[in-house]
Image: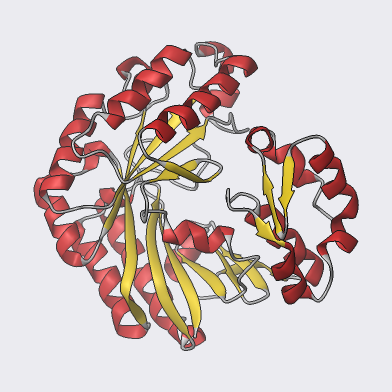
């Protein structure tokens, strides 16, 4: 039986953060209700496509999924449990913003089946939070974290973001240390570096914001993140993700390991959600009216992945994992030697110290992780 990761997109938020380029916006309670009904319809009507799959992970992302009423989350999970084969140890994650939950709501979400919480903190510095448009303070986060533990959540991720406007190396390391002081500390930490995306308020009005850290400071932040979290017992298992032993994100591993294990499929339900099943990839419409109506096929940009596409996925998704990729698995998957296909970039980056090869294993070095996008570009055939 094939593995299926299910992503549920909730495109609602209280207000957009200045750096956000995700498909999300504020919405009325009625729009949210109509959206949940359309979402349940999509999930139900596509169930026949996945009778040979076992759902190993479910991920509510956004937007701000915790903005939905807990009854809506419960209804969505109920539809999935009725129409899909759900693994007994399924991982069910919900992204939460500290200003959109309380103890009662978190208890209801836990009772509904959510067993992993991902809290968007970004920074413990209130000035930095205000600058990037977050709706919460550090104290709001502390209350949410305390409530989550009281509600019984024992698998919590915290999202952090470096290279923010006005952020210094000291304020970033303070954020890391503040999070590590939590009792108990989080099981998982995602530490991303800000990317100023075109079309966001930050991009359009960059001169109106405090300057972002220079390249050298950003690199120091990157190294300090790995050093400090390592000292506290977190293993870096992917470029931006750290976990205590046994708490790696199973859902995200489905994305990163799909190129290696083609039995790992993922389907996205909701506005603009992306899917890759077998050798087919598509995304849903980003038009809210069309999604709510669902009077026509909402799938767009449908493509059939070629062997070349799959080989590229195998390499640059697999190399995101610090465990790297296996030359033998590449051959078993494609009946071709990785050295025949990627001889030039492999030799180039190994000689420059960005990749290392130990027997069958090929992985990024610490410096290679720092320059991973440059390395990955060379593996596009």
- In the picture, measured across the screen, residue 37 lies left or right of residue 308, that is left
Residue drawn at point x = 74 percent, y = 63 percent: 327
Looking at the picture, how far across and down is residue 253, in whole percent?
50, 59
Q: Quadrant of residue 228?
A: top left
Q: Is residue 18 visible?
A: no
- In the picture, measured across the screen, residue 319 lies left or right of residue 12, that is right
The scheme the figure's colours follow is secondary structure
Residue drawn at point x = 64 percent, y = 56 percent: 318
Q: Is residue 179 visible?
A: yes
Looking at the picture, how far across and down is residue 176, in whole percent?
37, 26
Is residue 163 placed above or below 80 in the rendered structure?
above
Looking at the picture, how far across and down is residue 102, in whole percent?
14, 44
Looking at the picture, how far across and down is residue 286, in whole percent?
54, 56
- In the picture, measured across the screen, residue 86 lies left or right of residue 209, that is left
> How many circles with numbers are drawn on the protein?
0
Q: Quadrant of residue 280?
A: bottom right
Is residue 220 placed above or below 319 in the rendered structure?
above
Which quadrant of the figure contains the C terminus?
bottom right
Residue drawn at point x = 24 percent, y = 28 percent: 181
Is residue 316 placed above or below 333 in the rendered structure?
above
Residue drawn at point x = 43 percent, y = 80 percent: 54
- The residue at the far front in this view is 359
- In the picture, measured across the screen, residue 214 lies left or right of residue 291, that is right
Is residue 66 placed above or below 311 in the rendered structure?
above
């Amino acid at each position: 039986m094939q593995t299926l990761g299910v992503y549920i997109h909730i495109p609602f938020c209280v207000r957009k953060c200045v750096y956000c380029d995700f498909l999300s916006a504020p919405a009325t309670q009625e729009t949210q209700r109509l959206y949940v009904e359309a979402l349940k319809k999509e999930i139900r009507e596509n169930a026949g496509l996945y009778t040979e799959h076992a759902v190993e992970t479910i991920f509510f992302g956004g937007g701000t999924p915790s903005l939905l009423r807990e009854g809506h989350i419960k209804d969505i999970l109920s539809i999935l449990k009725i129409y899909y084969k759900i693994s007994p140890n399924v991982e069910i994650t919900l992204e939460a913003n500290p200003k959109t939950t309380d103890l009662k709501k978190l208890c209801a979400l836990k009772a509904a089946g959510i067993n992993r919480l991902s809290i968007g903190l970004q920074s413990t510095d209130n000035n930095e939070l205000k600058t990037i448009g977050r709706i919460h303070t550090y104290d709001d986060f502390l209350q949410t974290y305390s409530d989550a533990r009281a509600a019984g959540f024992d698998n919590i991720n915290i999202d952090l973001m470096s290279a923010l406007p006005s952020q210094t190396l000291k304020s970033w390391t303070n954020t890391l240390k503040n999070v590590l002081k939590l009792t108990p500390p989080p099981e998982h930490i995602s530490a991303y570096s800000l990317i100023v995306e075109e079309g966001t308020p930050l991009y359009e009005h960059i001169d109106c914001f405090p300057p972002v850290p220079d390249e050298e400071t950003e690199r120091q932040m990157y190294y300090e993140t790995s050093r400090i979290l390592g000292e506290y017992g977190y293993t870096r298992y992917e470029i931006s993700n750290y976990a205590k032993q046994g708490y790696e994100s199973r859902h995200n591993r489905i994305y990163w390991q799909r190129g290696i294990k083609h039995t790992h499929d993922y389907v996205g339900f909701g506005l603009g959600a992306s899917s890759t099943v077998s050798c087919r990839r598509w995304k849903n419409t980003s038009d809210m009216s069309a999604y709510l109506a669902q009077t026509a096929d909402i799938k767009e940009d449908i493509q059939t992945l070629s062997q070349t596409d799959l080989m590229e996925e195998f390499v640059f998704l697999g190399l995101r994992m610090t465990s790297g990729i296996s030359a033998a698995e590449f051959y078993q998957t494609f009946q071709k030697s990785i050295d025949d296909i990627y001889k030039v970039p492999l030799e180039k980056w190994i000689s420059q110290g960005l990749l290392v090869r130990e027997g069958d294993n090929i992985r990024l070095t610490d410096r290679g992780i720092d320059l991973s996008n440059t390395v990955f570009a060379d593996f596009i055939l």
